[in-house]
Image (cartoon, helix red, strand yellow):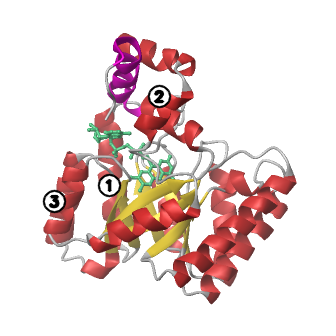
């Protein structure tokens, strides 16, 4: 991130929430389940699948984890009732990972069990590197009982190639592969875009060669193009992979992937915690944060 972008991002906390909200509308479905249903239905009509995320992470007390667990279980019922083409993504720190690992496992297990009963699937998001080992451990434990659950691995981390290899060896082969959103120290993470992309491609090839199911989660045209080549060269069946993108990011690429005949899933976050999520997105793309500030100072119309 260059100096100007750093400055822009540093200024964000001073920006009124109402202004952030107008920009956030692009990245989140809304605050309520009804908003999520509406957005997923629109995506489904356009030929895209969805994965719903109830916003929230790092909960401080067990009661909040239980509340999140019940909300997610209820969401699974709604998906079924509304006949949506959507699975659900969960964050383990929202289910108490930082409070007690067994408590978190129990909560995640209840969700995956409910999803199984309803014919649905749960994807465990990957959080910052302090969670990686525990998240993989919980995934392994859940897979002893359930096969409707998959994990996310981050190409940014140096350890990921080995993690992917050992999970594949154990037959645990349902992945989402992304670059990784968290800023991590150099000892454990690649810093250069080229190195991250190279690792992404290498791990993607490993996963696909091992007949894994892979969610290829990126908006990077170069990675999408190289994934296309890998899929074509290795004759990967259409049912073994899907592309994945975040709601509100690069809709033109989304349309292209669909037009090219690939399956595509959109990550649709919703809930009361929209502010924290949006700030994270702005940090990823300070250009948008810049528009927010410009609107603030020039009093431009926002929409
Ligand atoms: C479906 C999905 C699930 C994810 N799950 C996780 C997870 O569990 N854990 C995790 O750590 N990370 C997750 N991520 C985030 C991911 O790791 C990256 O941070 C993010 O996708 C940006 O990387 P990129 O591959 O798109 O490449 P980048 O090089 O960052 O972006 C490529 C291009 O996409 C556009 N772009 C990217 N981000 C934005 C944005 N916010 N707003 C507007 N344009 C943008 C820009 O034009 C940019 O040049 C997920 C991403 C997706 C798509």
Residue at horizontal 33%, vertical 77%?
240
Magenta residues? Answer: 284-299
Left or right: 78 as drawn, with respect to 94: left
Circle 3 SS class? helix
Q: Position of residue 199 (x, y in %)?
A: 35, 47
Visible residue check, residue 207: no
For residue 19, which numbered disc appears in the image? 2
Give the quarter of the image for residue 212.
bottom left
Distance between mark 2 and mark 3 Cα atoms: 31 Å
Q: Nearer the viewer, residue 296 or 143?
A: 296
- Circle on res. 59: none
Where does residue 125 sit, x and y in percent of width and height? 55, 57
Q: Tag 2: Cα neighbours inside 10 Å, few (<14), some, or many (≥20)?
A: some
Q: Quadrant of ligand 1?
A: top left
- What is the distance, in whole Å, between disc 1 and disc 3 at their CAs? 24 Å
Residue under the point 34% across and 67% down: 42
User: Which residue position holds label 3?
Assistant: 256
In the rendered structure, the answer to whether residue 19 lies left or right of residue 100 reads left
Number of numbered callouts drawn: 3
Whether the residues at callouts 1 and 2 have beta carbons within 8 Å, the answer is no
Vertical position of residue 6 compared to residue 49: above or below: above
Q: Which of disc 2 and disc 1 is earlier in sequence?
A: 2
């Amino acid at each position: 991130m260059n100096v100007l972008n750093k400055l822009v991002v540093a200024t964000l906390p001073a920006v009124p929430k109402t202004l952030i909200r107008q920009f956030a509308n692009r990245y989140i479905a809304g605050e309520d389940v009804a908003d999520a249903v509406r957005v997923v239905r629109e995506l489904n009509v356009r030929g895209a699948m969805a994965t719903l995320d109830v916003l929230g992470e790092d909960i401080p007390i067990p009661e909040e984890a239980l509340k999140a667990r019940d909300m997610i279980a209820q969401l699974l019922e709604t998906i079924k009732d509304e006949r949506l083409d959507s699975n659900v993504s969960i964050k383990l720190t929202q289910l108490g990972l930082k409070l007690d690992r067994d408590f978190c496992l129990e909560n995640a297990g209840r969700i995956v069990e409910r999803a199984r009963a309803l014919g649905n699937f749960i994807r465990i998001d990957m959080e910052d590197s302090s969670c990686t080992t525990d998240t993989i451990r919980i995934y392994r434990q859940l897979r002893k009982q359930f096969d409707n659950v998959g994990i996310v691995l981050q190409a940014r981390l140096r350890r990921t190639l080995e993690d992917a290899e050992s999970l594949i060896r154990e037959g645990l082969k349902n992945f989402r592969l992304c670059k990784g959103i968290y800023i991590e120290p150099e000892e454990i993470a690649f810093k250069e875009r080229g190195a991250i992309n190279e690792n992404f491609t290498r791990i993607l090839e490993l996963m696909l060669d091992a007949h894994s199911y892979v969610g290829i989660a990126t908006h990077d045209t170069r990675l999408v193009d190289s994934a296309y080549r890998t899929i074509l060269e290795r004759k990967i069946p259409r049912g073994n992979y899907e592309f994945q993108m975040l709601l509100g990011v690069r809709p033109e690429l989304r349309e292209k992937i669909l037009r090219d005949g690939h399956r595509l899933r959109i990550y649709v976050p919703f809930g009361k915690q929209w502010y924290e999520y949006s700030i994270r997105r702005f940090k990823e793309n300070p250009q948008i944060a810049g528009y927010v500030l410009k609107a603030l100072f020039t009093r431009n119309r926002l929409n």
